[in-house]
Image (cartoon, grey):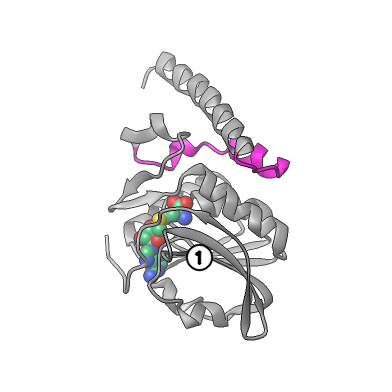
Amino acid sequence: MSLHDLNWLITHSESRSSRMIHQLREHGISHEELLALMGSVPRHDFVEPAFSHLAYSATPLPIGRNQTISQPLTVARMTEWLLSHSRLGRVLEVGTGSGYQTRILSHFFNKVHTVERQESLYLLAKQRLSSMGVNNVEYLFGDGQAGWPNKVEMDAVIITAMASKIPLALTNCLKQQGILIMPIDHPSPQIGCWRKEGDRWKCLGTESAYFVPLLEGMEYA
Ligand code: SAH
């Protein structure tokens, strides 16, 4: 890429990212630190290169291996729920994917545990975030339905793929009063936020959103 092309890409990414922030505000996202962060993280580095010109648009985009990065509003909404309702100690993310949501979480939580079942995505996200200087994330290549291996208790669990049933290992590793964010497809595809209260779950919010399915087992690169 020539210096001219690089300058063009940077300038256009900046104006597209400020449009993205404007749209997030219009949809009710109001956490200033989150908006500033999403305005500064280079989202175009997290999508497949052929789609980098669309990286700041209100749409999910391919990240390889038939998987997608969630659209900006979904990432913002899930994170804002966590900022409103969760302690910001440890969070478990199921579905590292591109690492974009991981990057956003790593800014606010002391520790992020993230699991990915596709080896190539796991390796790429790990390398990408390390090169960005992110150092409070533990990565695991595995099936996230089994939870985190050494039974650490989490303040929050965020599942970024659609499950047909709630994996018990994931709800069990959540502390009392912990926050669960996961997609559901009834009555229509959406993402929801719940608080664990004894053996009950209090719904704190829902938002329409589309996710790829949560799958069993692992896939090697
Ligand atoms: N948070 C991601 C979204 C990725 S899409 C981002 O910001 O880019 C969902 C991801 O979940 C995919 O990468 C998919 O491979 C992964 N996934 C699906 N089922 C899984 C499972 N059982 N365990 C771990 N990861 C899973």
Task: Name the residue rendered at 58%, 47% in the picture.
Answer: 76
Queried on whether the Cβ of the residue with tag 1 lies below 8 angstroms from ligand 1, the answer reads no
Judge left or right: residue 114 versus residue 64.
right
* Residue with the most extreme top position: 4
Question: For residue 45: magenta?
Answer: yes
Task: Name the residue rendered at 65%, 51% in the picture.
Answer: 107
Q: Is residue 74 above or below residue 204?
A: above
Please state, as top left, top right, bottom left or bottom right, where the N terminus lies in the image: top left
The three-letter code of the residue at mark 1 reads: Met
Q: Quadrant of ligand 1?
A: bottom left
Q: Which residues are magenta?
A: 27-48
Q: Secondary structure at mark 1?
A: strand
Task: Name the residue rendered at 43%, 66% in the picture.
Answer: 186
Residue 167 visible (yes or no): yes
Front position in the image: 164 or 129: 164
Front position in the image: 183 or 11: 183
- The x, y position of residue 38, in whole percent, is 59, 40
Residue 126 visible (yes or no): no
Tell me if mark 1 has few (under 14), some (14-19) or many (20+) residues whose alpha carbon lies within 10 angstroms of its own.
many
Judge left or right: residue 31 versus residue 14.
right
- The x, y position of residue 96, in whole percent, is 45, 58
Q: Which residue is mark 1?
A: 182
